[in-house]
Amino acid sequence: MPDAPSGAGALSRSPRLFAELERIGRDPPGITRPSFGARENAAHDMIRREAADIGLEHRTDAVGNLYVTLPGRDRSAPALMTGSHMDSVPHGGNFDGAAGVLAGLEMLDRLARGPQPPCDVTLMAIRAEEMIWFPQHYLGSRAAFGLLPHDAPDKVLRSDSGQTLAHHMTEAGFDPQPIRDATRLLDPARIRAFVELHIEQGPVLVDDGFPVGIVTGIRGNIRHRFASITGETTHAGAVPRAARKDAVRAGAELILALETFWLDVDSSGGDMVLTFGEFFTDPAMHGVTKVPGAVRFTIDMRSQDAATLDAFETTLAREAARISAKRGVTIDPGPSTRAAPAPMSPAIRAGLDAAATRAGIAHTDIASGGGHDCAVFAGLGVPVGMIFVRNDHGSHNPDEHMDIADFALATDVLTGWAMAELFPDP
């Protein structure tokens, strides 16, 4: 492997570009860059401008994804890829997604100063990852691979405007027809590997004192958005405990039973998180003097292990039936959606670990609880990896905070991995 390119370890562009992105997206109390909106377009224009300044090739596909490429000696060989997204949630932070794109740009800037790589090295700035704008997960990357439903452009509406995806794509200068035709704009067979750098969206790296995490996998999930419990609404003072069909108490028992399942998974060294994001009675029907007869709630369960997802569904069904019979209520989990776990490539994980170790960068293994575009690549058989950057105050909020020094270390890991992949020692 040749020596690290000139500039390794220093950030040539990112501090300035993060500041520019903050100005582009400023929307107190945070940052807003809507999918297929003017601010997302401006962020892509910024990357295109910087790519031209470095002397890199750049192109945009029909659905708006931007590809910035350092040409390799063999243009027909599968490309080494990195990337992330440039949109944000409303009033979010400045680093979610954008950190991965700017790290990729820094990596290409460094590689461009060294020997020509054997294959193309490409940064992908992906459109529309944040599902809050359009109810389709990983919209930009799935569109590139021809994986979106053919009717999505004309049926999927943006949350703020109520206008169709086709309307917003056309307004932004792109073409929804490839989605209707399921056209594959990006061939997974032409991708050697894809590594995504991203801020951690939880507290693990902050709490454990590591600037960088090597992701082991993206958790799959099971979601019940319309779960309900139906009991009987009665007088709070007149009905004794044994005669009540209390939906709230049944819900509390179900939550405790599923919490016990979670504790068992944790104690056995497994991976799982569980959230009841909504749990409510109808205030028009229930009050302080009524035994609640109905509850609606949601369940979000995630794990890296498909068997744990299966076991959770079995436990949920069993406990719902048991508690329903015990308390005289009907617990209906409702329809569910499921996303499979996306394990990271063991070879890429080892390569990222080696790159961090060579550079003397403290790091740890970590699971990804949130979904990311690289899961789409993994689902198509592309070897994938992820690097997390320490980030305080979580994500999807205005207080998101990534230290630029931690970002520089993570960028060094990304670049070091790419160097070892492209120029292995004999």
Image: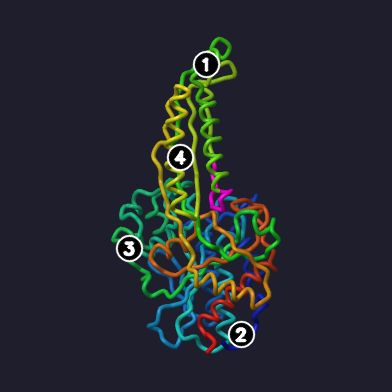
Q: Amino acid at mark 1?
A: Ala
Q: Is residue 371 visible?
A: yes
Amino acid type at mark 3? Pro
| Residue 189 among magenta residues | no
Please give the label number shown on residue 315: 4
Numbered badge on residue 5: 2
Q: Is residue 295 depicted above or below 187 in this figure?
A: above
Instruction: Name which of mark 2 and mark 4 comes first in the sequence.
Output: 2
Magenta-colored span: 266-275
The image's mark for residue 333 is none
Q: Amino acid at mark 2?
A: Pro
Of 284 and 254, which appears nearest the observer?
254
Alpha carbon distance from label 4 to label 3: 42 Å
Q: Nearer the viewer, residue 385 or 18?
A: 385
Disc 2 to disc 3, C-alpha distance: 39 Å
- x and y percent of residue 361 in the render? 67, 72
What residue sits 37% from the left and 70% below the top? Answer: 186
Helix, strand or loop at label 1? It is helix
**Front label number (1 vs 2):** 1
Q: Which residue is mark 1?
A: 242
Q: CA distance from mark 1 to mark 2?
A: 75 Å
Image coordinates of residue 347 in percent, x first then y, are 50, 72
Above or below for 107 versus 44:
below
User: Which circle marks residue 178 in the picture?
Assistant: 3
Which badge, 3 or 1, is on the more N-terminal residue?
A: 3
